[in-house]
Amino acid sequence: MPGPSIDAITQNYQPVETYRSYAEAQRAVDYLSDSGFPVGQTMIMGVDVRTVERVLGRLTYLRAAARGAVGGAWFGLLIGLFLGLFTPGPLSLFALVLWGLIWGAIAGAIFGLISHAMTGGERDFVSTSSLTADRYEVLVENSQAARAHELLSSLRG
């Protein structure tokens, strides 16, 4: 079930400034907050948002196994540390952590191989995804817009 529309969310708000980066918009809201402005009802809205996916390389069986092994090793380390809390002596703790790492890496590698094989060659690449926007608008409630605009004008300069 879809949520409320952007128009419904922003109907009592108006943009007071537009910025090219999220960091600039964040700085503006921080400035408003430092100036005593009630920022509890302030929004930063990305406009013309798009997804960017950067392909890093091919996902081979070796890479799938390695990624699975790293994830499994972390999980095994946590399990080994947790179980080590209930064992007497530092040698037992070390042994449990080491076995957790080893068995976690083995299980993770096997799971990585199986899950890669199950894809049947579909999406056999590694990538990272991010959201970007062309611009970011700082929106405030209609009743506070004049004050926010005045404060942000003095920030500009």
Image (cartoon, rainbow, N blue to C red):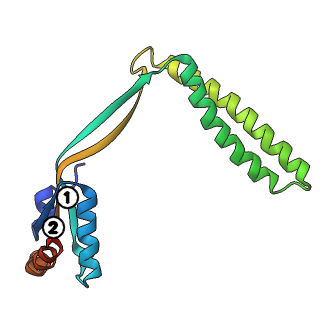
Q: Look at the numbered disc 1 and give the secondary structure of its residue.
A: strand
Residue at the far bottom: name it: 36
- Residue located at (70% from left, 28% from top): 106
The Cα atoms of the two marked residues, 2 and 1, are separated by: 7 Å
Relative to residue 59, is residue 30 depicted above or below? below
**Element type where label 2 sits in the image:** strand
Identify which residue is drawn at 10% across, 79% down.
Answer: 150
Can residue 114 be seen at all in this image of the molecule? no
Q: Residue at x 26, y 85 (%)?
A: 36
- Of 128 and 115, which appears nearest the observer? 128
Amino acid type, label 2: Leu
Q: Residues within 10 Å of mark 2 (few under 14, many from 20)?
A: many
Q: Is residue 122 visible?
A: yes
**The image quarter in which residue 112 lies:** top right
Give the residue pinned by disc 1.
45
Q: How many marks?
A: 2
Left of 127 or right of it: where is 71? right
The C terminus lies in which quarter of the figure?
A: bottom left
Question: Could you tell me which residue is drawn at 60 percent across and 26 percent down?
Answer: 66
Q: Nearer the viewer, residue 134 or 59?
A: 134
Where does the image place residue 154, in percent across and percent down from the top left? Answer: 14, 77
**Nearer the N terminus, badge 2 or badge 1?**
1
Give the residue number, with chain letter if any, for mark 2: 139
* 74 in relation to 11, above or below: above
Residue 122 pos. (x, y %): 39, 18
The reply to whether discs 2 and 1 touch (Cβ–Cβ < 8 Å) is yes
Location of residue 116 in the rendering, given as x and y in whole percent from the top left corner = 51, 21
Query: Is 69 positioned to the left or the right of 157 in the image?
Result: right
Q: Where residue 32 is drawn, which disc sits there?
A: none
Extreme-top residue of the structure: 120
